[in-house]
Image (cartoon, grey):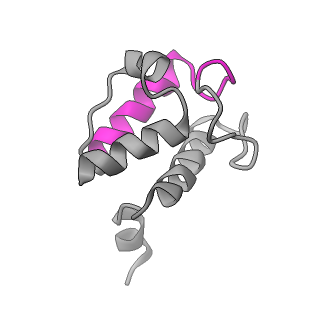
Amino acid sequence: MSSQTAAKAPPAGEADLVAEFRAYLAEISEGKLSEEGIDPAGHLFDFGYVDSLSAVMFTAHLEERYGVRIEEVDLLERFTSLEAVAAHVARSRG
């Protein structure tokens, strides 16, 4: 299997989703965040894991990769941590 194929396969469980989300946020932070430094239970905005631009990028990534649409405002009000986002994505994918 090519690495390109492996990269396109969505993670299976919530823990795998959280790990993938941490890696993605670290990647788009351009070195400002490390995967290990992102608390999966921490508030995405309050802990500085996302700002307005990265929130747009993250929600677009969720829709493109997992087919799950989350509005940016939901990252402030409903799905405020990576754990909450992962649980929602897992439920939505059924």
Vertical placement of residue 5 versus 22, above or below:
below
Residue at 35 percent of width and 51 percent of height = 90
Residue at 32 percent of width and 29 percent of height = 70
Vertical placement of residue 27 versus 15, above or below:
above
Examine the image and state in which quarter residue 62 appears.
top left
Q: From the image, which quarter does the C terminus lie in?
A: bottom left
Measuring from the top left, give residue 47's x and y in whole percent. 69, 24
Measuring from the top left, give residue 51's x and y in whole percent. 56, 19
Vertical placement of residue 60 versus 47, above or below:
below
Q: Which residues are magenta?
A: 45-64
**Residue extending furthest bottom?**
1
Q: What's the magenta bit mostly, secondary-structure-wise? A: helix
- Position of 14 with respect to 25 (left or right) is left
The residue closer to the viewer here, 81 or 72, is: 81
Residue at 45 percent of width and 23 percent of height = 75
Magenta stretch encompasses residue 39: no
